[in-house]
Amino acid sequence: MKEVASAGRIPAPEQMKKKLIDYCKSINIDLTGIVAAEPFTDFEKAWRRQVERGFISGFEEKDIARRVNPFLTLESAKSIIVCLFPYFTGDACETPSNRINLSKSAWSIDYHIIVKQKLEMIALFLKQHIDNFEYKCFVDNGPFSDRYLAWRAGLGFWGINNCIITDRYGSYVFIGYIINNYPFEPDKPRERTCLQCFNCVKACPGSCIPGDFTINPQRCKSYITQKKGPLSPLDVEILKKTNLIWGCDVCQEVCPHNKNIERTSLAEFLRDLKFGFEYNELKQVSNREFLKLYRNRSFSWRGKGVLLRNYEIINEKCK
């Protein structure tokens, strides 16, 4: 009997889940899990508390109903495939000709591009095996909490710094997911947390980690480096705490779960690495040239002006 779906037939969920996981491994995605498509009532309670505290960045889905109800995104939804994409390439060494002032998450080609391509490959594979397969892919731009889904899918555990932590790759992972209309068997969350050493709480430049597995993104340096418009005196003070002009790695660098982790096995995150900018490199390039050169980088969406502003605040002598 053929395992490929014939007209009007749906393959057995346990067989299809194995096919999915095997295919993901064949394209170097070794962390894949499933979340059942159902209202996320536990997340809703936690998220409403975050909103009440003002612990939101403004980038999240504003409609709480859409944030917790998968059926408002895909009416036929039955499950959500969640994949993690490790991006740690090792620690770079700063030299006179190699300035490091971008966070590790921005060294490679834009992760949105890399992850979206992988998710679409998975979806195409599933369409070849499942009749009438419907789906939507999201990479850091969907209505749900990526980290919540990764936890629900059993792919990692919560850190005090609100990151999802894995055994093999620590917290250096991007998250992508595919909401779809196939009833894959869901996985179970892991019943553990980080060591709760509070290194991240003590080291955070903006003191944005209160120690209760949440963060205040308004005081997160990574968030501040992406803000447009005038910065507050507190923003400026936080920005000056480290030399990164885009993003922040402090809470991950001091985390014991990120010691001796494996480097990424995804070749896309190992090519065309850019660790930082020199001042004149930013100052002399036009906005048009900047976008042409770096349109496939995650930091390009804010334009060169924000990076230049951050550079001049951190290095006042450059003004």
Image (cartoon, grey):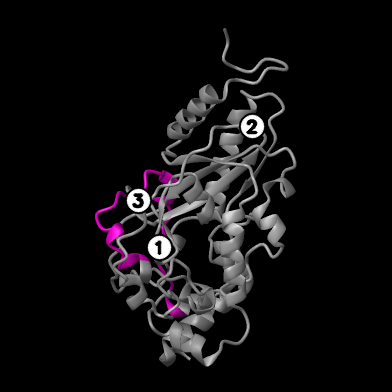
Q: Residue at x 49, y 81 (%)?
A: 310
Residue on which disc 1 sits? 104
Q: CA distance from mark 3 to mark 2?
A: 29 Å
Residue on which disc 3 sits? 169
What amino acid is labelled 3 in the image? Answer: Tyr
Q: Which percent across, then down, holds residue 264?
A: 36, 48
Question: Quick check: 140 above or below 130?
Answer: below
Left or right? Give the position of 91 relative to 16.
left
Left or right? Give the position of 186 relative to 91.
right
Mark toward the viewer: 1 or 3: 3
Question: Quick check: 31 above or below 213?
Answer: above
Residue on which disc 2 sits? 182
Q: Which residues are magenta?
A: 252-279
Marked residue nearer the N-terminal end (3 or 2): 3
Q: CA distance from mark 2 to mark 1?
A: 35 Å
Q: Residue at x 64, y 32 (%)?
A: 182
What amino acid is labelled 2 in the image? Answer: Tyr
Marked residue nearer the N-terminal end (1 or 3): 1
Q: Are marks 2 and 1 in contact (CB under 8 Å)?
A: no
Marked residue nearer the N-terminal end (2 or 1): 1
Q: Which percent across, then down, holds residue 198?
A: 32, 71
Q: Which mark is residue 270?
A: none
Examine the structure image and report whether residue 255 is included in the region drawn in magenta: yes
Residue 286 in which image quadrant: bottom right
Examine the structure image and report whether residue 83 is included in the region drawn in magenta: no
Q: Which percent across, then down, holds residue 19?
A: 50, 25
Q: CA distance from mark 1 to mark 3?
A: 14 Å
